Amino acid sequence: MKAENENFFERVYEVVRLIPYGRVTSYGAIAKTLGAARSARMVGWAMNAAHGKDDVPAHRVVNRVGMLTGKHHFDGTHLMQQLLESEGVKVKNNQVLDFEKLFWQPEIQL
């Protein structure tokens, strides 16, 4: 089972690496793209396990309404928000502003 999870995680990372600078996507959109629509939580686990992988922009993955639900997995109090803001993504009260405009739909755009 562990090898199966690692393979899924690597597939998640492949998609996350393609998220354009200044854009965001959701755990569920990634899961759906990978043919595992009910596995958004597994995508979240993959994002949590991505620490130390500098080539995986985990900060660009938010929940289905644009909330920074994974922020507590980043070092520092507001690192996830700071990383997004450094790319021009505005965040207020842990929510991506203009979420619909900035949302990257991997299933359609890949």
Image (cartoon, rainbow, N blue to C red):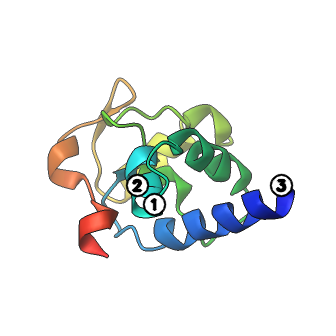
What residue is rendered at 55% in x and 37% in y? Answer: 70
Question: Dots 3 and 1: beta carbons under 8 Å?
Answer: no
| Location of residue 72 by image quarter | top right
Answer yes or no: is residue 56 visible. Answer: no
Percent x, y for residue 105? 27, 60
Q: Which residue is mark 2?
A: 32
Residue 32 image position (x, y, % from top left) = 40, 54
| First along the sequence among labels 3 and 1 | 3
Mark carried by residue 1: 3
- Mark 3 lies on a secondary structure that is loop
Residue 65's mark?
none
Can residue 67 be spotted in the picture? yes
Q: What is the three-letter code of the residue carrying label 1? A: Gly
Q: Quadrant of the N terminus?
A: bottom right
Q: Earlier in the sequence, mark 3 or mark 2?
A: 3
Name the residue nearer the viewer: 33 or 97.
Answer: 33
Give me the C-alpha separation between circle 1 and circle 2: 5 Å
The kind of residue on which mark 2 rests is Lys
- Amino acid at dot 3: Met
Residue lying at 27% horizontally and 43% vertically, measured from the top left? 90
